[in-house]
Amino acid sequence: MKKFSIIKQGLPAAFVVLSAAIFTWGQGASTTKQNIRPTNSSRSDQTTTATSPTPATVNDVKYTYEFTQPKFYVKHILFEHDANGHGTLTFERLNEDVPVVESVQISPAAMTRITSAWTALNFLDSQTNYQSSQDFSHLGTMKIGMQQGERKRVAEFNWTHNDNAAALAAEYRRISDQAMLVFDISVARENQPLNAPKLMEVLESLIKRNGLSDPTQLLPLLTDMSTDEHIPLIARNHALRIIKLIQK
């Protein structure tokens, strides 16, 4: 119970720290990667929405996580995935008009945690309101949703005392932060190599704070970076140290 309480209270703060760290170099980053938001995302403003059930298999299920805070550097995140962990992340940053869309594959370990939390919530058959009496909307609003066949439900909250809802939101935040960091590293290697050292600092900080979904997924990227002469030597050496940190 204590562990989940820490997750619930630390989630918005962790995001603020990440946004602040990236903001120092993110203003000047330029990228040719311009994507269009998927058109099939759920944008319901209702706390919960349910429709009549129809038979559906486990593989038909679709999950969504959404975070919104217009004043944050990363002002909007939408993550959608299927039962096999194949997903799409769409995110928007302050003062940028075009959202970025990235494909994401959730690791088996993370998918196990996600599935466990959804199962514990019994989400489609429940009408539980996860919003606590405390209002922390200034830290952002989260929506979690599930659709299976014609059955669909979306729940919205900015602060919750429900352990499973909090764990689910935290897991999706870690997935999103990891995917956004990988995107930023890719941009730096292609167009902004001098940003690589700062990104390595952000990466190490997130790993030490358990702020990433599955750092082992980054090992091939870090190994490649350690020999990439296009980025500064300090970043290449830092990549090697992070590899050791992940593997220990």
Image (spheres, rainbow, N blue to C red):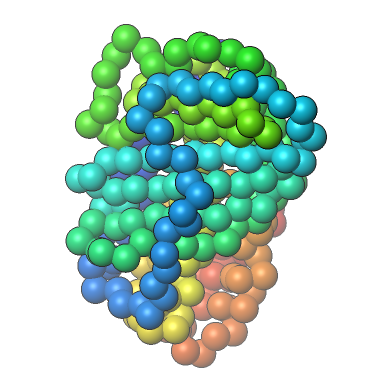
Picture quadrant where residue 26 is located = bottom left
Location of the N terminus by quadrant is top right
Residue 214 vertical position relative to residue 228 in the rendered view, above or below = above
Visible in this render: residue 44?
yes
Can residue 245 be seen at all in this image of the molecule? Answer: no
Q: Which residue occupies the extreme bottom position in the image?
A: 229
Query: Vertically, is 175 above or below 3?
Result: below
Q: Quadrant of residue 117?
A: top right
What residue appears at the point 59 percent right and 84 percent down from the top-left corner? 227
Q: How many marks?
A: 0
The residue at 61%/62% (across/down) is 218
Q: Position of residue 116 (x, y in %)?
A: 70, 27
Left or right of 80 in this view: 70:
left
Residue toward you, 186 or 144: 144
Above or below 70: residue 4: above
Residue 67, given in percent of the width and then of the height, sits at: 38, 40
Q: Residue at 48% across / 74% down in the picture?
A: 186
Q: As drawn, is 187 to the left or to the right of 63?
A: left
Question: Left or right: 111 with respect to 32?
Answer: right
Give the camera-side residue of 234 and 35: 35
The answer to whether 115 appears left or right of 229 in the picture is right
Q: Position of residue 156 (x, y in %)?
A: 41, 26
Task: Determine the residue positioned at 27% across, 41% down.
Answer: 69
Q: Please state the horizontal and vertical placement of residue 63, each as a whole percent of the image.
A: 59, 38
